Image (cartoon, coloured by chain):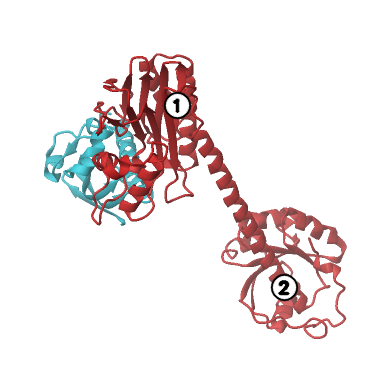
Chain colours: A red, B cyan
Amino acid sequence: MTGSSVVPAPAYPHGGLGRHAKLPPRERLRVLLIEDDDADAFLVGELLAETGDGIDLLVANSLNAARSQVSGVDCVLLDLGLPDAQGLDGLRQVLGMSSGAAVCVLTGRSDEHLGIGAVAEGAQDYLVKGQVDGVLLARALRYAVERKRADENTRRLREVELRQAESARLERGLLPQPLIDTDLVQVHPFYRPGRHEALIGGDFYDVVQTSPDRIDLIVGDVCGHGVDEAALGVELRVAWRALVLAGVPDEQVLPALEQVLMSERSAREIFATVAAVRLDLAGNRATVRLAGHPPPLLLAGGRVVPVPAPHGLLLGVRPRPPVAHELRFDTEDWSLLMYTDGLIEGRIGDGDERLDVSGLSRLVADPDTRRVGLPELPGWLVERAEEYNGGPLADDVAMLLVSRGEGR
Amino acid sequence: MDLSLTTRAIGEHTVLEVGGEVDVYTAPRLRERLVELIDGGSRAIVVDLGRVDFLDSTGLGVLVGALKRLRPVGGTFGLVCDKEPLLKIFRITALDQVFPIYPTLDAATSAESSGADA
């Protein structure tokens, strides 16, 4: 931090000559001087006027008067000896009322230490009365504004970095490593953030194996986009994992998850949709439950059909356990594709038509798709959906592909 | 595409005509308008989705939110929608069992009660 007072006062009181070369003409600055002493205020005005440096000076003779004038000002020049706010207290008030403006303080010769304290508190610079000429004052004000802008840019950059780091952390929480140890099925998770990358979605998935024959899978979506929704998605996923690991009976898991949602959400209009699947590998069958979520696709015997599970009400509206749908696989070669609605909400063609469950089923059944390996299939489907959409999909997409045998 | 919102009164009902796309970007405006209407004393609200081309889960959340705001003050909330793609969304989410959904505005505004019983 610099204090301009360390520069020796120039010998000529009305400077602008000598070693202080005149600054090139730049943008006009609006400066608000808060100074109760009319003579000092007059002097500052004179100093700035003679530099011709494009500084428009407004004067307030008290902190109170300054409040109505501070908006749109580039820099505040504050006398630390005001009647209505002494010393650093005045500075704190000014910093509070002028978030965008740079602040320079004026101190007397005898209280220069206040200037150093002021910079520590957040002022950009301090000037000692009687030790500045016009050019030095103008330059100090411009530097203060530039420094404030640089600080502001650094702060914004830091915020973006923090937000990205936060998104990354949340994404890790939303998209865990599947907790499975079996060769009987393969699980391929997939996630793609939507077009609005700054707004992380609340899509989540999880896979938990609780016995050699039993695997639970869930794909869900907390409505809305933002850190709160994503954090709630993490909570729901972890709660679901805990409920499954704790051996809570299958039919009680989603009602308990709904209770978690309703007690943890920040607003009553936040709800979640989930598709939950419990695989019984020994019996080669599955129990599918839908809560406001589009149905998984079943790939088997050369056909692709949405699992005809009843549409359950989404979680968080009117608690009601989703109805279980028992699915018996006819073959040892099948896949279930679970996904969030971001995948099917993309446009197809120029009209308002969307891909939808039916379009996705056709796409998965397409001969071109059948040539794509199962591990690559989720990514390939998103690429096709983006192609139809004519650009990136608006919403996040989470997918779980679980396959047995040849997988279709 | 943008969101359009037009309010008018039909008898006892306050009808909010929504047009365009209700998604993560535009849903906040729909929420604001509905909150304004409810805070302003509207107790029989019909949201006409006839000119809505797209409704995502954020938009659904706003509609559910309005229903939940109206319920404790004894209000009613109905939707007008006859577009198959939108109706499909209400079916998938089972919200067709929560919202009274009418094929026409006439049907909605002449209904005895748009029962906000969620």
Q: Is residue A31 above or below residue B30?
A: below
Whichever of callouts 1 and 2 sits on the residue coming sooner in the sequence is: 2
What residue do we see at 76% from left, 57% from top?
A: A118
Residue displayed at 19% across by 37% down: B101
**Residue A336 found in image quarter:** top left
For label 1, count other residues whose C-alpha is less than 10 Å away and answer few (under 14), some (14-19) or many (20+): many
Front-lying residue, B41 or A206: A206
In the rendered structure, find residue A207 and report the number of the disc placed on it. Answer: 1
Residue B79 % position (x, y): 21, 41
Please name the amino acid that badge 1 sits on.
Val
Residue shown at 40% from the left, 13% from the top: A249
Q: Residue at x 85, y 68 (%)?
A: A6
Location of residue B37 by image quarter: top left
What residue is disc 2 on? A41
Residue A394 placement (x, y as % from top left): 38, 49
- Do dots 1 and 2 share one subunit? yes
Q: Nearer the viewer, mark 1 or mark 2?
A: 1
Q: Taking the image as drawn, is residue A321 in sight?
A: no
Q: Which image quarter: residue A372?
A: top left
Instruction: Say which quadrant the C terminus of chain A sits in.
Output: top left
Residue A245: x, y in percent?
48, 18
Residue A282 % position (x, y)? 37, 14
**In the image, B40: left or right of A232?**
left
Q: Nearer the viewer, residue A128 or A3?
A: A3
Chain at numbered mark 2: A
